[in-house]
Amino acid sequence: MALENKLGITDSAELAREEERISKKKAIELYDKDLLDGLEAGKFSALRFIHKYLFDDIYVFAGEVRDVNIAKGGFRFAPVMYLDGALEHVSNMPQGTFDEIIEKYVEMNIAHPFREGNGRATRIWLDLILKKELNKIIDWSKVSKEDYLLAMERSPIKDIEIKHILKNALTDKINDRELYMKGIDNSYHYEGYTAFKTEEL
């Protein structure tokens, strides 16, 4: 079953293709129109703006904090009832060093504020922080998709692996449009979310 969407698509594979096509087009607009430069790097308000811009043509919930609990495999992301507090906490986490920035990124992943599209929006958000604080971004072409997804799955318990992978992919090519676009490659995206009711917690 496909998520309810503005396109009227009922096939999940078709929706995934259209979602990737449209969100990539919108991501290029974000970059080419310099819309990211005015955002407050590291704040949830910046992530909300990015998510809404990427997915507004696809989902009614674009930019809206989810109202359902979601899980991936055996891991359950932050429960809805604690989500606002978690997002405020992440917004206020320090981001002066590489380690602090990745810790903040991991915590935002655990929060997973949106029903869909968290990965792509949050990777743009991550590069925004790295660019502001360290004058670096991630060269996503140097990041193995499989290693990245495994490290992100393990990061709530131990974040040293994701720090190592991303540190080795840092670059000072902060204005490289092609590198920016690699970050929203759909193949870095988690599949198989499950929504569940609060009473199932």
Image (spheres, grey):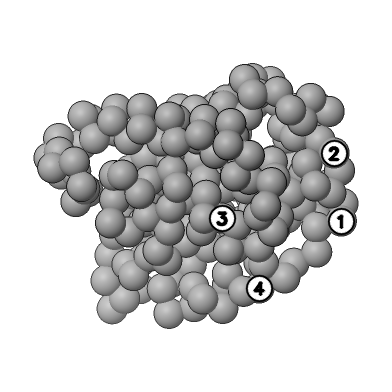
Callout 1 secondary element: loop
Q: Earlier in the sequence, mark 2 or mark 1?
A: 1
Q: Name the residue under label 2.
A: 135
Callout 2 secondary element: loop
The CA distance from mark 2 to mark 1 is: 12 Å
Q: Name the residue under label 3.
A: 47
Q: Do the residues labelled 1 and 3 touch (CB within 8 Å)?
A: no
- Whether residue 117 is visible here, answered yes or no, is yes
Whether residue 160 sits left or right of residue 156 in the image: it is right
Callout 4 secondary element: helix
Tag 2: amino acid: Asn
Q: Residue 58: x and y, percent?
A: 29, 44
Q: Mark 4 points at which residue?
A: 89
The CA distance from mark 1 to mark 4 is: 16 Å
6 or 148: nearer the viewer: 6
47 or 76: nearer the viewer: 47
The CA distance from mark 1 to mark 3 is: 18 Å
- Residue at the spot x=63%, y=29% of the render? 180
Q: Residue 13: x and y, percent?
A: 23, 30
